[in-house]
Image (spheres, rainbow, N blue to C red):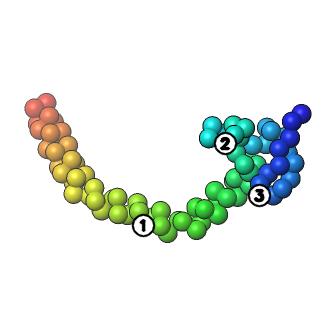
Amino acid sequence: MDKKTCKTCWRSLPLGKYRKNKQSKDGLEYSCRECMKIEDKVYRTIHREAIEANHKKHRDAHREERRAASYIYYHTHRGAKNENV
Ligand SMILES: [Zn+2]
């Protein structure tokens, strides 16, 4: 079975241990699945604050939009309910 050396842990692992990556030369990630998993975790931990801040920004930006949407929803549905009564 073909093997590939992980660029993070330097272990020689079977190709099945690597995620696919169309952008890389051999079509696989440079790091093994295990390392990618750890990297993802580390990335998320490090960037959690930034990601959360981004989400908050996004929420704030759309708050007015959503309020308007729920206002319309509420009024259209209330109107529909009244028609049924
Ligand atoms: Zn690895």
Answer few, some or many: residues within 10 Å of disc 3's Cα (few below 14, many 20 plus, some between 14 and 19): few
Image quadrant assignment for residue 85: top left
Secondary structure beneath disc 1?
A: helix
Q: Where residue 54 appears, x then y in whole percent?
A: 41, 62
On the image, numbered disc 2 is attached to which residue?
A: 24
Image quadrant assignment for residue 52: bottom left
Q: Nearer the viewer, mark 1 or mark 3?
A: 3
Q: Is residue 74 visible?
A: no
Towards the viewer: 65 or 22: 22
Answer few, some or many: residues within 10 Å of disc 1's Cα (few below 14, many 20 plus, some between 14 and 19): few
Residue for point 60% across, 62% down:
43
Q: Which mark is residue 8?
A: 3
Residue for point 79% across, 42% down:
17
Towards the viewer: 47 or 81: 47
Towards the viewer: 66 or 32: 32
Q: Where residue 11 appears, x then y in whole percent?
A: 86, 53
Towards the viewer: 10 or 63: 10
Answer few, some or many: residues within 10 Å of disc 2's Cα (few below 14, many 20 plus, some between 14 and 19): few
Give me the C-alpha separation between circle 2 and circle 3: 16 Å
Q: Which mark is residue 71?
A: none
Relative side of 3 to 78, left or right: right
Q: Where residue 59 appears, x then y in whole percent?
A: 33, 59
* Mark 1 or 3, nearer chain start: 3
User: Looking at numbered disc 3 in the image, what kind of residue is underneath it?
Assistant: Thr
On the image, numbered disc 1 is attached to which residue?
A: 53
Secondary structure beneath disc 2?
A: loop
Relative side of 66 to 2, left or right: left
Ligand 1 within 8 Å, label 3 CB: yes
